[in-house]
Amino acid sequence: MHLLKKLRTIFKISKGKARPSRELRLDFALQERVDNTWPVTTGIFLRQAIEEQENQLPYWRLIDDCHPVVKKLELNREEIRRLRVLEGLE
């Protein structure tokens, strides 16, 4: 699946709505007409997407401040919490 198609899926997540990794994996699977996708594959994509689109991608709708990718990418935990609170996700 192309990165652009996956990014569109994330950008479609409405403000104030969270999308857990499991649901995101199922969304990606449906796009590819398969039963499911591997958590590792989804994690790799998520990391790539955040690295490339951090300032535009609403990644706080997909992860909380304890998600493993936060540490790997040295994301600001406080900022993630703040954005999630602003959207009513916490």
Image (cartoon, rainbow, N blue to C red):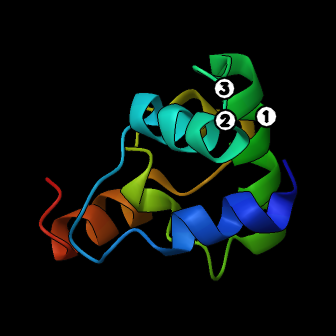
Q: Give me the residue at 72% from left, 19% from top.
A: 40
Amino acid type indicated by mark 2: Arg
Q: Which residue is mark 1?
A: 44
Quick check: 14 above or below 63?
A: below
Q: Which residue is mark 3?
A: 34
Q: Nearer the viewer, residue 63 or 22?
A: 22
Amino acid type indicated by mark 1: Ile
Quick check: 6 above or below 31?
A: below
- Marks 2 and 1: CB-CB under 8 Å? no
- Marks 3 and 1: CB-CB under 8 Å? no
Compared across the picture, whether 21 is left or right of 38 comes to left
Compared across the picture, whether 88 is left or right of 44 comes to left
Q: Give me the residue at 21% from left, 71% from top.
A: 16
Picture quadrant where residue 28 is located? top right
Amino acid type indicated by mark 3: Val
Q: How packed is label 3: few (under 14 Cα within 10 Å), some, or many (20 or more)?
A: few
Q: Earlier in the sequence, mark 3 or mark 1?
A: 3
Q: From the viewer's perspective, is the residue at label 2 or at label 1 nearer?
A: 2
